[in-house]
Image (spheres, grey):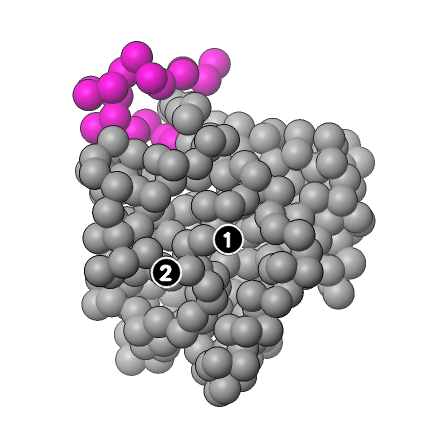
């Protein structure tokens, strides 16, 4: 595990973008596992700049997203399909038909989960998986549970997640209670994982996830088993790790 400490969100985003850009440069046909939420927005902006100003090309990449809200169509402004389109896909040269997300409008959960798992298998797994971490330690929408999930599944979101994500909706009641999420297994089987974390409110859960017991009650703790894990955190998010495990942290210039 490598932990990079950035003074602020912009520097964290730039470092994470550099790692993702290097992945695409070294393997232009990379399968990229992508994440949504507030944290990766700066990184997506930085990648758009790399594409526009430095010729970074995603034309051979394929992308698979971690999750999608059940009930929201791809053109719903709060859907993750819409988010990805707006924040990244429309700003780079990726082929639209090479971008994949669970279909939130498919009401046949079994069929949708099987379809997504078959898709992941047909892509040959994920070369680099980008992750954020939830306040409760979730990765994707794999919420704290009695055991680690395996394949794609439909999940009832916890109150803490609904509360955290309701800020993106006009009214909290509009926030879907269910989502489709990739399971833990394809996430941890990714050949490389890049975890981005920002905000002091994540400091405690991040330290617990990376240095506490490996338990499904903190889903991100499974990342301790990943051989190639890169963490890019900003000062607030890394405050607990810096005070307890400073020798393991690399400061960015
Ligand atoms: P955030 O979400 O980036 O909006 O904090 C992260 C997550 O829930 O995985």
| Residue at image location 78% in from the left, 58% down from the top | 95
Q: CA distance from mark 1 to mark 2?
A: 10 Å
Q: Which mark is residue 149?
A: 2
Asked if the magenta segment contains residue 175, the reply would be no
Name the element at disc 1. helix
- Picture quadrant of residue 209: top left
Graded by Cα atoms within 10 Å as few (under 14), some (14 to 19) or many (20 or more), the crowding at tag 1 reads many
Q: Where does the magenta region start and end?
A: 233-253
Asked if the magenta segment contains residue 245, the reply would be yes
Which part of the image, by quadrant, shows the N terminus? top left
| Residue at image location 38% in from the left, 36% down from the top | 225
Q: Which mark is residue 173?
A: none
Query: Seen from this angle, which residue lies furthest bottom?
Result: 107
| Residue at image location 75% in from the left, 65% down from the top | 97
Q: Which mark is residue 186?
A: 1
| Residue at image location 21% in from the left, 28% down from the top | 240
Comparing 7 with 128, the one in front is 128
Q: Can you give x and y, in whole percent of width and height, for residue 155 in the image?
A: 35, 71
246, above or below 9, in the image: above
Mark yes or no: residue 198 visible.
yes
Graded by Cα atoms within 10 Å as few (under 14), some (14 to 19) or many (20 or more), the crowding at tag 2 reads some
Looking at the image, residue 211 sits to the left or right of residue 22; the answer is left
């Amino acid at each position: 595990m490598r932990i990079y400490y950035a003074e602020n969100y912009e520097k964290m985003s730039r470092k994470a973008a550099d790692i993702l850009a290097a992945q695409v440069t070294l393997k232009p046909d990379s399968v990229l596992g992508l994440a949504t939420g507030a944290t990766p927005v700066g990184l997506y902006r930085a990648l758009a700049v790399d594409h526009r100003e430095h010729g970074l090309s995603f034309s051979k990449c394929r992308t698979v997203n971690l999750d999608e809200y059940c009930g929201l169509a791809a053109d719903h402004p709060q859907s993750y399909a819409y988010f990805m389109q707006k924040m990244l896909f429309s700003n780079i040269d990726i082929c639209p038909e090479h971008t994949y997300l669970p279909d939130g409008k498919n009401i046949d959960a079994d069929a949708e989960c099987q379809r997504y798992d078959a898709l992941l298998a047909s892509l040959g797994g994920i070369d680099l998986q980008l992750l954020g971490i939830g306040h409760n330690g979730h990765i994707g929408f794999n919420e704290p549970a009695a055991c680690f999930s395996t394949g794609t599944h439909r999940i009832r979101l916890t109150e803490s997640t609904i509360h955290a994500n309701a800020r993106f909706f006009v009214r909290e009641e509009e926030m879907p209670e269910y989502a489709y999420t990739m399971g833990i297994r394809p996430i941890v089987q990714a050949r490389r994982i890049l975890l981005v974390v920002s905000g002091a409110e994540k400091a405690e859960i991040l330290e617990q996830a990376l240095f506490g017991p490996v338990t499904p009650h903190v889903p991100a703790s499974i990342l301790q088993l990943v051989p190639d894990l890169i963490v890019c955190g900003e000062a607030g998010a890394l405050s607990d790790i810096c005070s307890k495990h400073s020798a393991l942290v690399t400061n960015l210039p």
